Amino acid sequence: MNPVTGVRRHSETVSSRLDGDVLVVVLDNPPVNAVSHSMREGLLAALTTAGRDDVVAIVVTGAGTAFVGGADIREFDAPITTPTLPEVTAALESSAKPVIAAIDGVALGGGLELALACHRRIATARSSFALPEVKLGIVPGAGGTQRLPRLVGLAAALDLVPTGRTVGADEALRLGLVDELVDTDVVAAAVAVATRSRGLSPRRTGALAVPKLRAEETADLVAAATAKAKGRPAPLSAVLLVRSAADLPLATGLAEERATFLALRASPEAAALRHVFFAERAAARVAGLEGVAARPVATIGVVGLGLMGSGIATAAAIAGYSVVGVEQSAEAASAGEMRIADLIARAARSGRTGGADAATVAARVVTGDDLAALAGADLVIEAVIDDHDAKAALFGRLDGIVRPDAILATNTSYLDPDRLAEAVSNPERVIGLHFFSPAHVMRLVEVVRRAGTAPEILATAIAVARRLGKLPVVTGVCEGFIGNRIFSAYRREAEYLLEDGASPQTIDAAMEAHGFAMGPFAVFDLAGLEIAWARRKRTPRDPAVRHVDVADRLCEAGRFGAKVGRGWWDHVDGRRVASPEVAALIAASRAAKGIVPRPVTADEIVARLTGAMVAEGRALLAEGIAARASDIDLVMINGYGFPAYRGGPMWAAEQGARG
């Protein structure tokens, strides 16, 4: 013990001090207080220290801005070491002296399991809680599936554990997950509760009974949770484990939970999801930005308030920015304002506005038809038609309106931002920010790094994307950048499969069975076929490259996709139906080229389509467009629906090569 401060250090990450006759144990493992071997070892040692007669109770808290942000994922690929987290949670729960968790910040995964094993939980209003293990292909392994239902009931636990959903402090209080919320010093409040607990028997979570439900209520809850799991092993296992808490003794339930956790921990799905976890952290490390600070950004301008621009404006307003939206006319600006207000209202109803009400968020947005309103903006994002001349003309006008240091960003999907930058006097402030539709929902943003973009502009664009709640992935300049260039290769191969003998239905079914939410032709219909058609018409065709003309024939027939009820599929009452007209067009195209259709298996479809992605990804790496293979995986998972539990196309190909 330090004789001056009275602090006793139990490990590198755990210390304790006496506050009267209460032992305050502090968990300190920056940046998020991840549960590591050092923390487990230190916490167990601190509990042993608390066995002294002059300590009446224990308060466990986290240093910094987190209680405990989850397990140290780096340990998942290493041998398990003791003490394990279940041993620590058991020691907390069995303590003869009351243990109070003082929570200020996140309590996630193993952190929430520690809190559940404590006898009371006191939190601040900024705290949040989740058991997100299913997102890593595993289940809670230290009591989460067994203790949570005992506190909050089966309905809430079946909502939270199989989905990994995060709840805020107010909801946690309503559910009974926490016992009290405080505005003041949470540790002082916990110490006061601990002092009042002198002589009282600890309230052990594991000793509580799961609140009883009627058999049919339980069956309905389990059926709904099972349907949401969509066949994935981890969510399905979580459903079964939570359900078992109502019938099994704690010790038996904990043993089943641990066995399931260990089995899933070694699964290919969990390995793939860990790859995705670390890929996101790797994407944040951008070469050339070491020590480069982002500029402050308070006001964001958005030019073009169609679906994309309105989504970008909505995301910016929810993130707390002041937003200035500009359209070509007062009528278009008014329509954009209404669209933004509707998107904000929907986000508020679903709890995606950070606790702010819709009116507060909407008040951050002003719209109009005068570009001069952007004079004070720190960042202006154009979201007008994807046409070079239109965008270049807009940049030229903005160059004479915005401040010389304001950042100009283009949301182009395919155009060359280097050429667009030629329209402004200081092109180093021009960057690409390629959002994905709907922009207020989709997580991915491709940050297009031009050769002439200043480092601080790039750093600022990345910082803004993160504040918007997005996943920024830096890409170099090429047609389509990372995502659309790979998607173009995917589209080509899908059309080759059609000519070879497959149908839109068999191709979509194969890719959906592989884990995609939608097959390629369903996606094409949803996006609209006329956009790619217009691009094909203005792009010279290489006669040496195989060309399938069926998509052109569909557009000539007015089959532009889901919005008109006809595309690669017929769309009837919200359902996709195979189209005889499309089948005839495909057959005619084959016949014109002398192609005799052959059976194409689902395995061949998956292999060829994922192979096309991988081949284009390798070309992007060779050209230096993508910095790392894992960046490509992130783009395809977050922008194009590649199943995350397969790790992305590049990861999956690497695992396949390893055998």
Image (tube, helix red, strand yellow):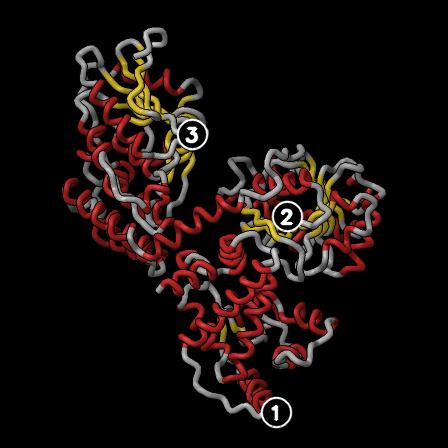
Circle 2 is placed at which residue position?
Answer: 312
Name the secondary structure under disc 2: helix
Q: Residues within 10 Å of mark 1 (few under 14, many from 20)?
A: few
Circle 3 is placed at which residue position?
Answer: 30
Whether pointer 1 and pointer 3 mark residues with C-beta atoms closer than 8 Å, the reply is no
Residue occupying the point 24% across, 27% down:
44
- Measure the C-alpha gap from mark 1 to mark 3: 66 Å
Q: Residues within 10 Å of mark 2 (few under 14, many from 20)?
A: many
- For the question of whether residue 483 can be seen, the reply is no
Taking the image as shown, residue 394 lies to the left or right of residue 488, namely right
Nearest to N terminus: mark 1 or mark 3? 3
Q: How many marks?
A: 3
Residue occupying the point 33% across, 61% down:
231
Q: Is residue 86 above or below residue 242?
A: above
**Mark 1: amino acid:** Ala
Q: Position of residue 218 (x, y in %)?
A: 25, 51
Q: Is residue 518 above or below residue 192?
A: below
Q: Position of residue 83 (x, y in %)?
A: 22, 34
- Measure the C-alpha gap from mark 3 to mark 2: 33 Å
Residue occupying the point 66% across, 77% down:
555
Nearest to N terminus: mark 1 or mark 2? 2
Circle 1 is placed at which residue position?
Answer: 592
Q: Quadrant of residue 429?
A: top right
